[in-house]
Image (tube, rainbow, N blue to C red):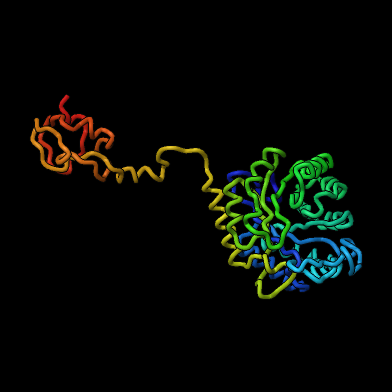
Amino acid sequence: MKIGSCDIAAGRTPFVIAEMSGNHNGSLERALQLVDAAAAAGAHAVKIQTYTADTMTLDIETGEFLISDKASLWSGKSLYQLYREAHTPWDWHPRIFERCRQRGILGFSTPFDETAVDFLEGLGVPCYKIASFENVDLNLIRKVASTGKPVIISSGLATLVEIGEAAAAARQGGCRDLAILKCTSSYPAEPASANLATIANLRDAFRCEVGLSDHTMGIGVSVAAVALGATIVEKHFTLSRTDGGVDSAFSLEPAELSRLVIECSAAAAAVGSVVYGPTEPEVASLQFRRSLYIARDVRAGEPLTRENLRAIRPGRGLPPKYLETLLGRRTTRDAVSGTPASWDLIAS
């Protein structure tokens, strides 16, 4: 799979997406600073979200339109209020994407309805993301897929059947490059709810690139996901959690994002392939293995004993597994202490 100039595949550096979401806190200048910070941290892409409060929900402040869960980060807000506060104004999009180009980083978005897709197409985005709460909107998925651009779908809340329906809609709509992100849609999410073992299953089931949309705190879960085969990692990103904002509580700060990029790259490199025996960098260390050495001067014809033949470091002598075989055998010549044991030293 290829997005812009970035190749996404097993064994390559993971594609790291810095999700801006509402962490611009209503400031275009802050949004541009977030792009700069993401680029400086080594992220490959900045993602924003394209919606308005009116394209997301109804302006109702009662019943199911009100977030009443006391444990929620957004408790007490109506859905309309939350989306009005968090949305990225559409007239900011060209400036944000232009800053991405200037900083050598990809810029793209999550559209939440068909009008957003049409708008983003006019801006030439390189790919699209389908959010977890929209992965059941098959018409939206088909609309996005019809652009022919790569599609990334988050799997939060979705059953295996629903993920299958979303993947089928994307492919039927014309998508040739599909990725699915394992996602736990709680904010913040606990590591124990990540269920990263699903990553390999998703890859086998849908034959596409698989990654992680990570809402846990810190970077540990993301690094573990890469070790388990994730080729894409998406994390929410802010300049400082102390600045507040709708997503700041579970967002990475710049230094953490930089560490994420470094450690995910290391994790991908560490996976490697099935290898036994010394690797090329290890060959020089073979000399430090234990092996059999003459530990006390011996004369020609003298029998070998546990006192004059020992398994020690370094590793120039015969392997220690031959110790019992050699005990009692006689030497063919004089040998001083520190002589590595060899077959030509042993009488037949």
In percent of width and height, residue 115 lies at: 89, 56
In this rendering, does residue 117 appear at all? yes
- Give the answer, above or below, for where 133 lies relative to 201: below
The structure residue drawn at horizontal position 75% and vertical position 72%, both measured from the top left corner, is 25
Q: Nearer the viewer, residue 4 or 276?
A: 276
- Give the answer, above or below, for where 121 lies relative to 277: below
In this rendering, does residue 175 appear at all? no
In the displayed structure image, the side of residue 348 where residue 81 appears, left or right: right
In percent of width and height, residue 116 lies at: 86, 57
- Give the answer, above or below, for where 223 lies relative to 278: below
In the displayed structure image, the side of residue 50 where residue 310 appears, left or right: left
- Assign the C terminus to one quadrant of the image: top left
In percent of width and height, residue 255 lies at: 58, 67
- Give the answer, above or below, for where 141 lies relative to 348: below
In the displayed structure image, the side of residue 179 where residue 89 appears, left or right: right
In percent of width and height, residue 133 lies at: 80, 55
- Assign the N terminus to one quadrant of the image: top right
The structure residue drawn at horizontal position 83% and vertical position 42%, both measured from the top left corner, is 169
Residue sitting farthest toward the bottom: 243
